Amino acid sequence: MNSITKSLLKSIKHGQAAWLRSSSTHSGKQCLPKLVLGIETSCDDTGAAVVDDAGNILGEALHCQKEVHLKTGGIIPLVAQQLHRENIEQIVKEALSVSGVSVNELAAIATTVKPGLALSLGVGLEYSLKLVNKYKKPFIPIHHMEAHALTIRLTNQVEFPFLVLLLSGGHCILAVAQGVSDFLLLGQSIDIAPGDMLDKVARRLSLSKHPECHSMAGGKAIEHLAQTGNRQHYTFRVPMQHYRNCDFSFSGLQNLVNKVIIQKEKEEGLQKGELLSCIKDIAAAAQHAVAVHIVKRTYRAMLFCIKHSILSPKNATLVVSGGVASNQYIRKGLQILADANGFAFLCPPPRLCTDNGVMIAWNGIERLRAGLGVLHCTDGIRYEANAPLGIDISKRVEEDSIKVPRLKMKI
Ligand code: KG4
Ligand code: ZN
């Protein structure tokens, strides 16, 4: 039994026979599904996956460096590079072997080439180009944030255009996805990303020493502790309230939280690094301020898109993705916003919100289907640490100066 037959049987077994529809007969001939291998190394996760053109995930593998970076108090690029180097071959082999697909059967190889940590991107690109050249396969360079934005089309039936909010450790972006590689950038963080802020607060609170969350990512640890904290014990001013645009800012908020932590340490007679008694309340209040800030900017983006008929009020959709989108509190705030404005609200499942190889493979499939950026010659291909997403219309958004009405948000 060849691997295509194996994957067909596997899809049927898992009730995912959707690709039979798209790969069925054309003029009497059986069309085999197109398969893409996706490779992700933009930050601290080494991921690989094989996905077919109907969105079946045939095999995937992921190596997370989180525990190592938690110990060193943040990502050290040279360490991340070394870990990618040590793991990439094994991860790609595992994804291929689980899928039962050989490199020869692939229609293309898709790899994140921007944006991200230069040293990390370099490992994925170098490895991919070796495979591409050895097996003479087309190469599809992937924009990491485009991949986050399009993941929802793998898990749900979503047509363009849709409003997309990307919340991660490195980015905070509000955009309209108009097509596979056609985005309007409405706003983004002017300083750090929400995941970065939550990670820094978690580090300052020494959450890795807390018995309930010692191996969790910072944002996840904050979410976990906030569940049993009282957010009303502290109030952090929501950032940028007087700026009527769709940009975000989190570093001022991080400073406000730090000030409270320092003051509480003094009051409790603790040294930096010792666990405060009010840790859960601070986590809850910080998470609440992050959620309200994100909801308010997204509200303005919704009003802008409806006002300019970029989205139709009849079938508008808000998609949220990126590592921070797995936060249930922030999701709930956004769900309330979407309901109040008649938007459908969609998030990929948490494991596809954080970095993974599946989203890169799926972006490859989307590009392959649309015939966009499929390279048969890789001369001159480079990674880019910084790369904007789409056409920046954030100034146009600011010119409109849309006032956001009050929204009752009992999360
Ligand atoms: O998208 P992602 O996996 O990697 C980047 O491209 O940045 O996002 C990682 C970020 C980290 O900052 C992590 O703390 C945050 O996502 N994160 C969370 C949660 N899970 C992960 N933030 C808030 N709540 C969570 N449950
Ligand atoms: Zn990401």
Image (cartoon, rainbow, N blue to C red):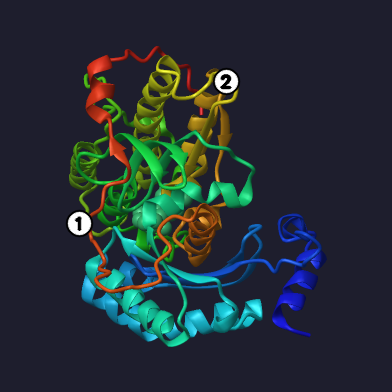
- Mark 1: few, some, or many residues within 10 Å (few <14, many ≥20)? some
Residue 348 in the image: above or below residue 398: below
Residue 55 in the image: above or below residue 324: below
Residue 272: numbered disc: 1
Q: Position of residue 42 (x, y in %)?
A: 34, 65
Q: Position of residue 403 (x, y in %)?
A: 32, 13
Q: Position of residue 194 (x, y in %)?
A: 32, 44
In this rendering, does residue 222 appear at all? Answer: no
Going by the numbered disc 1, the residue's amino acid type is Lys
Ligand 2 - quadrant of the structure image = bottom left
Image quarter for residue 183?
top left
Going by the numbered disc 2, the residue's amino acid type is Gly
In front here: 23 or 49? 23
Tell me the quarter of the image containing the N terminus: bottom right
Labels 1 and 2: the sequence-earlier one: 1
In front here: 265 or 88? 88
Residue 258 in the image: above or below residue 41: above
